Amino acid sequence: MRATRRGTLRSPVAYLFVLPALLIFLLFSIGPTVYTFALSFFKWNKLNPALSTYIGLQNYETVFTGQGDPSFWSTVGISLYFVVGMVVVGTAAGLVIALLLQRGSRLLSAVRTMVFLPHVTPLVATSLVWVWIFNPQFGLANLVVHATGHANIDWLGDSDWAMPAVLVYSLWHELGFVSIVFLGGLTTVSGELSEAAKLDGANAWQEFWYVTFPQLRPVLALVLLVESVTSLQAFTQFFVMTGGGPGYATATLGFQLYQQAFVFSNTGYAAALAVVLFLVTAALSILQLRLQGGGFPSFRSLLLRPRQLRKARTT
Amino acid sequence: MARRNRPGRIVLGIVALIVGLAFLAPLLWVLVTSLSSRGEVYRFPPSFWPDWHWSNYSQAWAAAPWIRYFLNTVFIGACTVALVLGTSVLAGFAFARMRFAGRNVLFVIVLAVMMVPQTVLIIPNYVIASRLHLLDTYLIQILPFGASVFGIFLLRQFFLSIPTEIFDAAQLDGAGPVRMAFQIAGPLARPSLILVGLNTFMGAWNSFVWPYIMTTKDSIRPIEVGLNSFYGVNGTDWTTLSAAVVFTTIPIVVLFLFLQKYFVTGLYSTQGAVR
């Protein structure tokens, strides 16, 4: 063993250091990813894998011609409904909340915690809370509907309302996260530029739109992509709140993976769906790294600045 | 100037408070329901003040093996945290402070693991686990989560920021890489370790899909899977169900409130994880 410059050790022990982590990744992430590709070329026999038959691209044919039940394309449509809802509403509302809570008075800090709290609650537990809120007879949601003079809605049992209901829950769970990311981004916005704009006679909206917003672009790109990836994979709230129903009204791609593999035992077909989901996610992740020019370091510059955040909270 | 802004600030404060209460309302609502009698709950419009029906809690507590679920969750969580911290310190130290052939390639491979969604992995992992007879074990609930890209990355960044003189001095004293990683670098990284540990533990507490699919026996299942089966059995009785939601959620919320200063800085690790 000998030292090189800048305190760097040259030693074969390094391989032993990275081995445990790499072994776990290899066994449970990298290997299984490759295995998913393999599975997708088989008509898989769940009870006796030895009886599985190689069928080439047939599973993909079923996927892309929409012959699956439900059709892949309707699943894509439903996923898009959810993803677009989460990304558009989530980003806009998250930004508004961040701007609202930007100043760090004691009250506003308390409100930050209140907004963020739902994000740390377990998905199963709070999905149940919202199943109760969306109860067709006694739920809180219908109290609001009732107050506006409309008839009660069977939220989760109506194919038109089930997705909006799951969206409301998911936004409630996710908005705290989005606004904290934006709050982190706002601490990097130059105060001097804003002051200059004000001196030049810009009103609050102009100051935001021409000065603050352009500086938030990198954070915005990050939020858009992270939210797309996260909502594309959402599963638990669909499992608890709607079970993909009524019918297939809320059967997103993430939910279909589970349903096809573990309920309908179409493992090969589910694997083909998984490959599609993997490729879309990987493309989005690579896009994210590209947009950030090198990726991880800017994650760090955005979020891992405890001192700045603390400062932002106290000023 | 400050005085002129005063009315504005008050309005801002009120609006913010309303937003905050809107986010809090569902949690308060489940608290109210958990303390209401059945007659009071099944009524429309609902009553907003509970009649302190504490027996919902004892009823819910007696109806399922909660202690078992809690112990399982804590055991799985603690083992996962220990593994994650160990693998992260070792790999983070090697990637930051050691020089070896293939270092950059291996680091890129680690980062690439982030791109694989958990949803995708559950199908092949189920097939693999069933062939290796790992279904219905603690091991399959712990080992796959025993290494974290976020943990490795965060510790690597931290170790890069430590002044090199500390390591040079240690080396003069004859410290080898193992001692350097665990006795010098590790203790200095305490805040990062708490952040990674907290995130891992919360992940274990919230995990649902994975243990739901990989296990069938109540005796080894964690809390959220238990809560889901309680819902399956008692799904129509919202008073006891709400009580169960409250006592399974309060520990993790309290943990968060105590440690939130560590948490805000490291939100990313909770993202994209299905478990």
Image: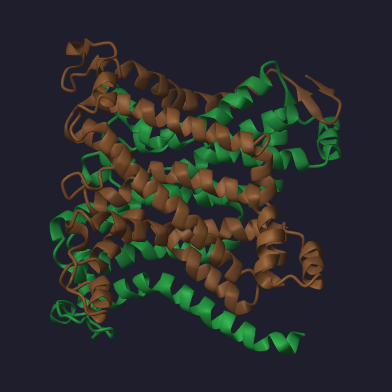
* Nearest the eye: B93 or A109: A109
- Figure check: A10 above or below A209: above
User: In the displayed structure, does residue B74 sit left or right of residue B3?
Assistant: left
- Figure check: A11 above or below A285: above
User: Which quarter of the figure is the N terminus of chain B placed in?
Assistant: bottom right
User: In the displayed structure, does residue A236 sit left or right of residue B163?
Assistant: left
* Residue B162 found in image quarter: top right
* Nearest the eye: A59 or B162: A59
- Figure check: A291 above or below B108: below
Q: Is residue B129 visible?
A: no
> What shade has chain B been given?
green
* Nearest the eye: A57 or B245: A57
Q: Which chain is brown?
A: A
Q: Residue at position x 22%, y 56% from top?
A: A160
User: Which quarter of the figure is the C terminus of chain B placed in?
Assistant: top left
Query: Residue B175's spot in the image, x, y percent?
Result: 77, 31
Q: Is residue A86 visible?
A: yes
Query: Residue B98's spot in the image, x, y percent?
Result: 73, 26
